[in-house]
């Protein structure tokens, strides 16, 4: 009987050891900067059913860091969600680590440039990036409003000691839902620039930022639902 108990205990300990080793391995993969084989599929990262937010990541060929994807549903309609996202002065209220944002130049009602500056953690140099934004308005045929944010590092002169982000590729698609709600799918890739920030820390923020930003966006939209001002950009195609 005693030998049987000892064998059972050893078996439990072996299972625990294997599980712990597997967890450590998963954590190492989570924060590793290098690619692993078979990278071109989205991997589930977080599911928040309470707030209707799901996040994913993947590593792609010829890219150092991970790409991200967020799927979310909001209690506000498409127009409110879009107006909040397109308010270039408002990003520090909801975008993680954003310290400054401002419109640089309006090209048309579906195209503009704006500027973002971010506070970096642990005393590292702050980052900034000018962005080119293009809208593909919602129509019955397209079924969604598409907003493309592209980093244009050389659009304005550098501002030392700030480090300019070398890459920013983000696309957001907003779709109307019944009962005055909307859904959002955002996919993106961002590089931090410089060689002084650890890859694991970059991956941490790429893991946390999409989720935190989506939650903050949902909370901030309420102000736009009550606003009297119309969005200055064309969200819907003229039928």
Image: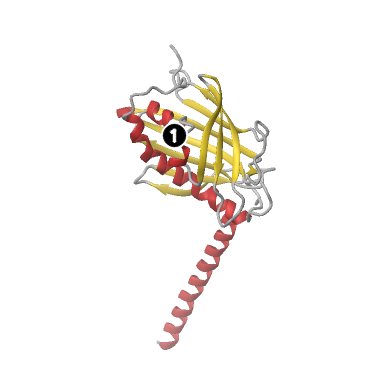
- Examine the rendering and report whether any part of residue 112 can be seen: yes
Residue at the top extreme, as displayed: 239
Which residue is more in the foreground, 136 or 96? 96
In this rendering, does residue 94 appear at all? Answer: no
Up the image or down, 212 lies above or below 175; here it is below
Q: Where's the N terminus, which quadrant?
A: bottom left
Name the side, left or right, on which 34 lies relative to 171: right
Residue at 48 percent across and 46 percent down: it is: 96
Drawn side of residue 99 relative to residue 215, left or right: right
Residue 87, image quadrant? top left
Residue 109 versus residue 19 in the image, above or below: above
Between 133 and 183, which is closer to the camera in this rendering? 133
In which quadrant of the rendered image does the C terminus lie? top left
Percent from the top left, x then y, of residue 118? 55, 44
Query: SS at mark 1?
Result: strand
Question: Measured from the top left, where is residue 189 in percent x and y?
Answer: 59, 40
Colour scheme in the image? secondary structure
> Which residue position holds label 1?
184
Residue drawn at (52%, 49%) of the image: 207
Relative to 187, is 219 on the left or the right? left
Q: Residue at x 51, y 43 (%)?
A: 99
Q: Quadrant of residue 181?
A: top left
Instruction: Spot the residue most to the front.
Output: 160
Q: Position of residue 46 (x, y in %)?
A: 45, 49
Crowd around label 1: few <14 · some 14–19 · many ≥20 (10 Å): many
Query: Nearest the camera: 239 or 83?
Result: 83
Q: Is residue 122 left or right of residue 220?
A: right
The number of callouts visible is 1
């Amino acid at each position: 009987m005693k030998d049987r108990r000892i064998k059972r205990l050893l078996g439990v300990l072996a299972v625990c050891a294997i599980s712990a080793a597997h967890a450590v391995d998963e954590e190492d993969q989570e924060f590793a900067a290098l690619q692993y084989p078979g990278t071109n599929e989205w991997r589930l990262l977080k599911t928040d059913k309470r707030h209707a937010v799901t996040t994913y990541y993947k590593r792609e060929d010829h890219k150092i860091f991970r790409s991200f994807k967020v799927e979310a549903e909001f209690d506000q309609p498409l127009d409110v969600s879009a107006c909040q996202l397109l308010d270039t002065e408002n990003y520090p209220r909801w975008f993680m680590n954003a310290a400054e944002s401002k419109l640089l130049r309006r090209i048309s009602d579906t195209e503009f440039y704006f500027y973002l500056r971010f506070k970096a953690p642990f005393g590292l140099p702050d980052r900034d990036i000018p962005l080119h934004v293009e809208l593909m308005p919602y129509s019955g045929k397209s079924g969604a409003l598409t907003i493309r944010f592209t980093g244009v590092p050389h659009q304005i002169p550098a501002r030392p000691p700030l480090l300019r982000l070398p890459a920013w590729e983000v696309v957001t698609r907003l779709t109307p839902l019944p009962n005055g709600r909307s859904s959002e799918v955002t996919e993106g890739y961002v590089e931090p620039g410089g060689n002084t920030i650890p890859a694991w820390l970059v991956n941490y923020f790429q893991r946390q930022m999409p989720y935190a930003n989506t939650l903050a966006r949902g909370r901030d939209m309420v102000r736009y639902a009550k606003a009297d001002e119309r969005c200055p950009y064309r969200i819907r195609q003229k039928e």
